[in-house]
Image (cartoon, rainbow, N blue to C red):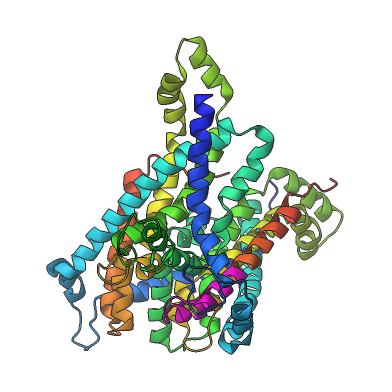
Amino acid sequence: MALISNRAGWASVSPALGWTLVFFVLPFAAMLAISFYPQDGSGFSLAAYTQFFASPSYYYALFNSLEVTGLVTAISILLAYPFAWILADVVPERWQRLALTLAVLPFWTSYVVRSYSWLLVLSENGLVNATLVKFGILSAPIQLANTRGATVIGFVHFFVMLLTLTIYANLKQLSPNYRKAAADLGAGPIRSFIHVVLPLTLPGIMVGAFLTFVLAIGDYITPQILGGNNELLMPQLIMMQIGRRGDFTSASALSIILMLVVTLAYLLCARWLKIERT
Amino acid sequence: MMLRLTSSIYAALIYGFIFLPVFVLVLFSFQASLFPIPPFNGPSLRWYAAVLADKRLVAGLGNSILLALSTSALATVLGFLSAWGFARFQLPKSGLMRGLITAPLTISYLIIGMGLLVFFNWIGIPKSLIAVGIGHVVINMPLCFAIIYSQMGDHQANIERAARDLGAPEWKVLSLITAPLLWPAIFASFFLSMTFSWDEFVISFLLTRFDTTLPVEIWNLLRAGLNPKTNAVGSLVFGVSILMAILFEVFAFRKRPA
């Protein structure tokens, strides 16, 4: 490749590099620094971190986050996989695009609104309770909103759509020859699925699972609107440090802990997550 | 036959689950009474009128549109320039620098917002829409870079070289050759950035005070509990987003003469 002058190259990359350095790297460094310096001016201290590991109300938020996120990831994959498979293999080819577009349509609701609309469905006088009481299945409304279950439902709704998209793309990439070969060798549809299709789509599922994990564990809106304050998740705890107490030190330390957890998850899945480069 | 039946039932259940909240949202936006809960007693447009009469919501809408357009334009330009620089020049430590530019993609918005809040607070930049705009460029530029960079191939480099041989200066090559060749990738970057900026909540929430974006104004409405006005504004936002998606499909995937 002929090189013109590297000056033009530097000139074209430096605005983006500069932006990233000033508004991403520096803020991150500032956050890291502040997490070691309590706001009372007492100098360097690990207090914000030791506080996290010492008080159950703090580290339980991380446990809750991990539990909810794990549950959401598992349920979403289990629901989305058969659905994506139906869209890819059962629905006739010419309807697939429409079927898929419909399946992800609510994706386009704003995400604050999406959680709110589940509140409409799950609240004490909401659709589910009203219907169940009307048909005599329940004698009185039960609490569905402001529970962990509501948070999980809100998340699963979003990630079923996302995972359907990624798994569908994966299934479509799969050459039908693999399945033909399996059939020729005498495997029925179930064996062919377990031994051929599933292993071949596993990398795609892992990418989707990781994406779900990262997006769900950092989300504040869904647990705040649907889960309420009975049980805090990590992002709620972080926002609470800022909102109620104005404690930047603690909020920064908690953000860094959350980020380390995500990094750890990344390292654990790294062998399946081959991000393609050209 | 059995398989088709099971599949149809399963698909119907999933579609039902996916559409249930949206259906309830839109239906009760036409509620005539004070609460968006059964029984439905509309249709009425009173809550849409209430939304349009709400100065804060209308201001939030304007801010969101302005922010989406301006930050996406900036993110796309910065992403495009850097993608071109990395694809066409052999810069030292190129891999490392590309890694740095795409790094924000792996960090939660919450943490990016928190970092900016701490940083701006420290150097004395007040909370404002400009602060939010800076944050939106931080989250969207890596995406624009990744999309455009992945589409930069050698065949375009050859055409660029031909233009240079014919005496075109570098800025002319970029604007008259490279950008038009990469138009679908540039367009996709701009549109994706717009949708992410339009929908972004937590950075806006952390970095603004009074003058804020639509998602934050909707959040403020939520504090009043269930309210058909929230349904109405939510349905409007949904409508606008669908419209954007349709425009995107039409423009990005339309077959154009080669």
Residue B229 percent location from the top left of the image: 54, 78
Residue A117 percent location from the top left of the image: 47, 65
Residue B145 percent location from the top left of the image: 59, 58
Main secondary structure found in the magenta portion: helix
Residue segment shown in magenta: B217-236
**Residue B234 falls inside the magenta stretch:** yes
Residue B80 shows in the view: no
Give the number of marks.
0
Give the residue at x 60% y 49%. Answer: A102
**Residue B117 falls inside the magenta stretch:** no
Q: Quadrant of the C terminus of chain A?
A: top right
Instruction: Between residue B26 and residue A266, name the one nearer to us.
Output: B26
Give the residue at x 57% y 23%. Answer: A176
Residue A258 percent location from the top left of the image: 30, 63
Residue A131 shows in the view: yes
Give the residue at x 52% y 20%. Answer: A179
